[in-house]
Amino acid sequence: MSDASLLVLSSLAGGDKHGYAMMEDIERFSGARLGPGTLYGAITRLEERGWIRPVKSNDRRRPYAITGAGHAYLRDQLVKLDRVVRAGLRR
């Protein structure tokens, strides 16, 4: 998976959000600004894998929620990334 996918999953782990809210949240917690193409490409891939799902909304925005499988995948990837970060910092 791409870094963008991990950023989207991390954002949704904090609660349901629509695309623009995810972009703002991701920039706030990571400093990375995802363009719309990158963001919506990641959303499409994550939805196809069953790691996120759309949530009903009363307006034109389409919020998403992370699924149980998405939480499990995110946790696994973050544990692996943590090992890499710790090894890199030691070196």
Image (spheres, grey):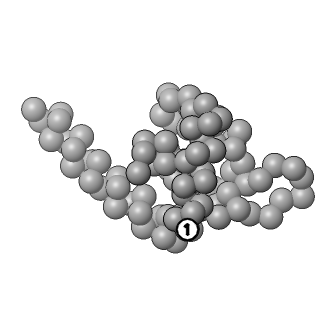
> Is residue 73 found left or right of 58 in the rendered image?
left
Residue furthest to the bottom: 68
Q: Where is residue 86 in the image (x, y as percent from the top left)?
A: 19, 42
Across the whole image, how many numbered discs are drawn on residues? 1
Residue found at x 56% / y 28% = 33
At x 49%, y 48%, the residue is: 5
Quarter where residue 22 is shown: top right
User: Tag 1: Cα neighbours inside 10 Å, few (<14), some, or many (≥20)?
Assistant: some
Does residue 48 appear left or right of residue 55 in this picture? left
Q: Is residue 13 visible?
A: no
Foreground pick, 52 / 85: 52
Residue at (81%, 49%) from the top-left corner?
A: 61
Residue 2 at x, y = what percent? Answer: 42, 45
Q: What amino acid is found at the position of numbered circle 1 in the picture?
A: Gly
Q: Name the residue under label 1.
A: 50
* Kind of element beneath mark 1: loop
Q: Looking at this view, is 83 or 53 the one in front?
A: 53
Vertical side of 30 occupied by 62: above or below: below
- The reply, left or right, for residue 28 in relation to residue 88 is right
Figure quadrant of the C terminus: top left
Residue 21 appears at what percent x and percent y?
69, 41
Quarter of the image for residue 16 reads: bottom right
Q: Is residue 88 above or below residue 7?
A: above
- Inspect this view and state whether residue 35 appears: yes
Taking the image as shown, residue 46 lies to the left or right of residue 53, namely: left
Can you name the residue that lies furthest to the left here? 91
